[in-house]
Image: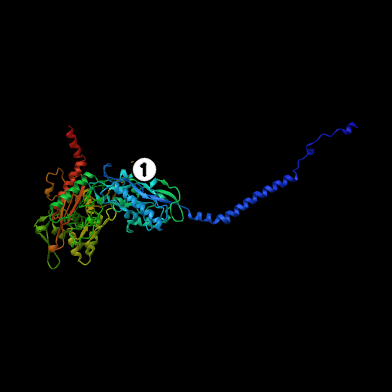
Amino acid sequence: MFNRLRKKPMTEEDTPVNKPSTARLNLFFFAAFVIFSILIFRLAFVQFVEGPELTYMETSRNTKDIPLAPVRGPIYDATGEVALAYSEPVQSLYVLLYEDYRNDERRQEAEELAHDLAAVFKQFNPGDKEQPDGEEIIKRLDLDYQKTFGYVPRLVKSDLSTKEIAFFMEKKADYPGVMVLEENIRKYDPDGVAVQVVGYTREFKRAPDSIAKYKAIREGASTQRDPGLVYHEEEKVGFDGLELQYQEELRGRSGYQSIDIDARNLPDGTMLQTPPEKGYSLVSTINKEIQMAAQEAITDELRRLPKAITGYAVAMEVDTGNVVAMASMPDYDPNDWDYDKIKYVFRNGTTESFPPNDAKPSRAESVILLGSVIKPLSVLIGLKEGLFTAGQTYHDQGYAILGKDGRQVKNSHSAYNGSITARRAIEKSSNAFMIDMVGKRLLSKYGSEGIDIWDKHMKEFGLGVSTGVDLPNEFLGRLEYTNKDESALTRLAFASFGQQAKYTTMQLAQYTTMLANKGKRMEPHLVKEIRDADGNVVKEIKPKVLNEVDFADAHWNEVHKGMVTKVSAFDGFPYDYARKTGTSEQGTGPNKKENGVFIAFAPRDNPKLAVAVVVPEGGFGSVSASPIARKIFDAYDEVYGLDGTPKGKKDEGKDKE
């Protein structure tokens, strides 16, 4: 009995399960229903009530990047210390339009702000008529958004004074939308060093499509995704010279201001700024001391000569191709740009040319006939082509006869030279020798194809082709011997003594360098190093030989020995040097012009420097051009030394002793 009443031990299967009550289940389902109802209601509210507004906000809000002009890198002279062009920081006043001022009420507020700003400028700059007045500031604010969108800050005034900066920083709360931002303005050496080499800058919006790189930037603007490469219309870019040639290296990268805008293209948020990056610097081959000597020498000669109004010179190192001086005078001031002042000299220099205008005598063409300076090459061609030998003599009676009509072409002053060799013909500058021994004999050997042979040799020496100089817009010359309106005899005869082609002073300097180094056409360089913002060299421009000509060494020596014309400007010059004077003639009668040309290299046996000088309407080259060359050689000797020892440093050492 007792055993039957004892309970059986419980196992895991016998454990009781607590089941929820019906009330608790109902509460759970009710809570879930409420929560889902709220979510569904909210979703419906967002979709049907707030949806249009959110859609509008989504489409009407955007972020715009406003470019900040990069800090343009400097251009130094050959020492790496004298800045020929540099960017100077200035503080500028901008206004950001937060409202649409195209209605009368709002516009009145903006106009009142403009007049208030004008009053501030007048207060700190009394008597300065250059300060913008209220009407001018209204124009600059562009309240009708004709020039740009509302979110782009409007430039009101550049180069604020310290008092103006302090005022606007202190009164910032009183002038909503007014900002003082740092910018950079481009400045150039006040001495006007090699202006047409360095070039100048202007606003990107003014860049013509004829400048291919800027046309490409405009065409690709819509697809440019890198804000650092975005150009804005007011940004200063290179328009000429090294400023244009090395635009990408000098420019750096744009900074930008990021700002939210609304559907009206007006600011609607905080502006975030990413600063611009500084561009690379250029170390040019131009030495300021030598350059100034060249410029001053040309200017002095122009004062002395009765007809000459322009002069050009290029000094090029024989072994490196480095251009240490490149002068075009008179020149202009890139810090004070006024086209009316410079239109007769602008871009009319050693690598470019505008046609002459006899109605405007203040404009003279820089590209002229070479005259007798071509005669060393003429003799080289004659020797190379086997037209005569070095020892062969020619009887120079003072003239050569052209054609069956017996037309005479005379030597300068009808000089009678008697029996002369090729070497003597160079020294005496015999036109008759060149016509009879080179021009006529080329025609006899090749017929009319003699023109092509002549042209081939000219271009091998860089005459009539690009020199490769690192400057834009190089003029390649004017080859009158290709004019088929004249007979082949006339063209070859006159070409042989320098009266059938016009070349730039840069081409003439490259040709002179080839005479000096016996046939290597060196590429002229105006930049020798490119450095980053920390001064590290990122690229070094090394000497480059464009082509070589194969002439017998004996022929070179014969020509060099002939380059000994008497030149009084070099009296007392301490080195033996090779030279050739030239006087080319253009026009006839009262319109006849005599142009002075001179080439030289020194020292003769171990050439370091080649110089070419052109003085349009300067008369004889021995009188007008050679004094300029002498001063350039002297300046180079002082700075670098024609024998490898700088004379300036030697003199300094003596002074210390």
Instruction: Characterize the local packing of mark 1: few (<14), some (14-19) or many (20 or more) Cα atoms within 10 angstroms.
Output: few
Nearer-the-camera pick, 343 or 265: 265
**Residue 312: x percent and y percent?**
20, 52
As helix, strand or loop, the secondary structure at mark 1 comes to helix
Q: Nearer the viewer, residue 515 or 364?
A: 364
The residue lying furthest to the bottom in this view is 405
**Is residue 191 visible from the viewing direction of this image?**
yes
Image position, residue 491 (x, y; %): 19, 63
**Residue 90: x and y, percent?**
32, 45
Left or right for 136, reference 37? left
Q: Quadrant of residue 11?
A: top right
Amino acid type, mark 1: Glu
Image quadrant in which the N terminus is located: top right
| Residue found at x 19% / y 39% | 648
Q: Which residue is mark 1?
A: 170
Observer able to see residue 561? no
Q: Is residue 6 left or right of residue 19?
A: right
